[in-house]
Image (cartoon, helix red, strand yellow):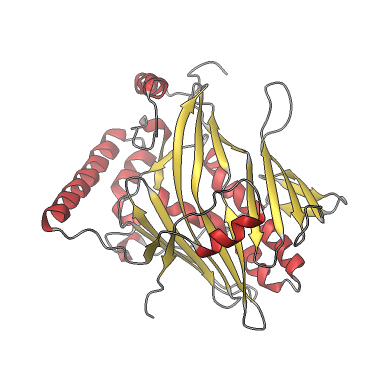
Amino acid sequence: MSEGEAVPAAQKQSWGQFIKQLASLSGDLYSMTAPPFILSPVSLTEYPSYWCERPELFAAIADGKTPEDRALRVLKWFISTLKGQYTSRNEKMGSEKKPLNPVLGELFFGTWPDHNGRGQTNLYVEQVSHHPPITGYYIENPTKGVALQGHCAQKTSFSAGSITVRQVGHAILGVKLPDGTVEDYLITLPSLRIDGIFYGAPYIELTNNSWIASSSGWVSTIEYKGKGWVSGKSHQFKAVVTPPGSSTAAHTVEGLWHETSKTSKGEPFHDVRGPKEEVSVKAVEEQDEWETRKLWQHVAKGIRTGDFEAASREKTKIENEQRQRRKDEAGAGTPWQLKYFTHIDEDPKYTKFAKLFKGGLEKEDAYVFQKPAA
């Protein structure tokens, strides 16, 4: 593919300006304005739904009979989320798209209904910071006693023709056991590299390592590898699962995270080639003004229909309203109050479980979910 080949003719000028901006900018890129053809009609607050587009695997974690069994089920569920999180826009829209940058306080709610006794799964998302953009999320299946709480932000930079993204944040998965105790799992986030920028057809490759560390002592170390310059396949991974107090692998899993994988014994492990189950969301007409799809509805319509002038106009309107709101709050001395999350400077579970592997930060902050009254 030649330079700019995937860029629509009407967008080549804005694409060229974008590339020049990238090449000359140092530091974080989150505030950059992307050319319309690589804009997504979806806000970043919808992205946590990718954690549970296979809700049967999320629910099945609770069915594990031993810490080892549950650790493998958590790993299988986690690997199965990666396709939705990192390649689904390429399949749906032709290339990776830049999501809409959420406003402070933006909300997204959804459910995956009960099916075959798996229980209903609920999703709560709130944009807890605008500068830098940080999204807090909570996913729960009360019937099965499984819950995921986390937050994510991105630190981005441009180098050697690619955008490098270091994901900041983590998630804690809790599983309520039959004896009433809770088994926790710390889940760290992989780093990303966005290639294909010069061609106008961005795509994501995962890089480096991420970890899943359990309160039971089981640890999964996941190594990500992409396609090399000469050979190899995209989206490769290798996961090594070690028991408490040991660095010797009890299980090894290898494959392509966007397709299938097998254990070292040749047994099938995960398979995401089949259909996913998208989150169910209330109709826009029933949503609050702060809910994602209502807030961005006119911008999304413009992007989807190719009316980028209308999309830009509506987007600017929202952004100007937010700037004025921040000025008014500063003048009145009444800063914005989060509705569903409370910030803590240090997550004690992260600090405890991060000691089980090498490569993570010693400590991280967190946003603790406050469940609304029924």
Residue 245: quarter of image: bottom right
Q: From the viewer's side, name the closer residue of 230 and 344.
A: 344
Q: Which residue reaches farthest left?
A: 331
Q: Residue, x 16% and y 48% (percent of image)?
A: 324
Query: In what quadrant of the picture does the C terminus appear?
Result: bottom left
| Res. 335 visible in picture | yes
Q: Is residue 39 left or right of residue 169?
A: left
Residue 174: quarter of image: bottom right
29 above or below 173? above
| Res. 87 visible in picture | no
Q: Residue, x 56% and y 41% (percent of image)?
A: 191
Q: Which residue reaches farthest top?
A: 2
> Residue 319: x percent and y percent?
24, 44
Q: Residue, x 73% and y 71% (percent of image)?
A: 64
Query: In what quadrant of the picture does the N terminus appear?
Result: top right
Q: Is residue 53 left or right of residue 218?
A: left
> Residue 176: x percent and y percent?
61, 76
198 above or below 85? above
> Residue 37: x percent and y percent?
40, 31
